Amino acid sequence: MNVAEIKAAVDAGNLVHWANEGYRVHRDGLGQYLITFVPNGSTIGLTDRSGRQLNGAEADFFILEPDHGTAAG
């Protein structure tokens, strides 16, 4: 996912993660897009100061699809 896709997904209310489900991408009250490691609250910006370079590889961002209770077995 690129920067624009990530921001659009967050704005649409999707659960966006980076690298694994422990890292959540969100927007704060000031409109900043952030990556937070949920277990300890450690947070960095989604991008560098220019707003163009992601703080992570595009391929490592993903939307967590909701579980609709369709477990096998």
Image (tube, rainbow, N blue to C red):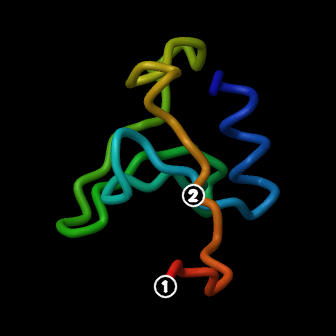
Numbered tag placed on residue 73 in the rendering: 1
Distance between the alpha carbons at the discs numbered 1 and 2 = 22 Å
Residue type at numbered disc 2: Leu
Residue 21 occupies which quadrant of the picture? bottom left
> Which residue is drawn at the image coordinates 66% and 50% (left, top)?
31
Is the residue under label 2 in contact with that under label 1 (CB below 8 Å)? Answer: no
Question: Residue 34 or 60: which is nearer the viewer?
Answer: 60
Residue 48 x/y as whole percent = 44, 19
The answer to whether 38 is drawn above or below residue 19 in the figure is below
The answer to whether 7 is drawn above or below residue 73 in the figure is above
Question: Residue 18 or 66: which is nearer the viewer?
Answer: 66
> Which residue is drawn at the image coordinates 60% and 76% (left, top)?
67
Residue 69 x/y as whole percent = 62, 86
Left or right? Give the position of 65 relative to 19. Answer: right
Badge 1 crowding class, 10 Å Cα cut-off, few under 14, some 14 to 19, many 20 or more, is few
Residue type at numbered disc 1: Gly
Q: Which residue is mark 2?
A: 64
Question: Residue 2 or 32: which is nearer the viewer?
Answer: 2
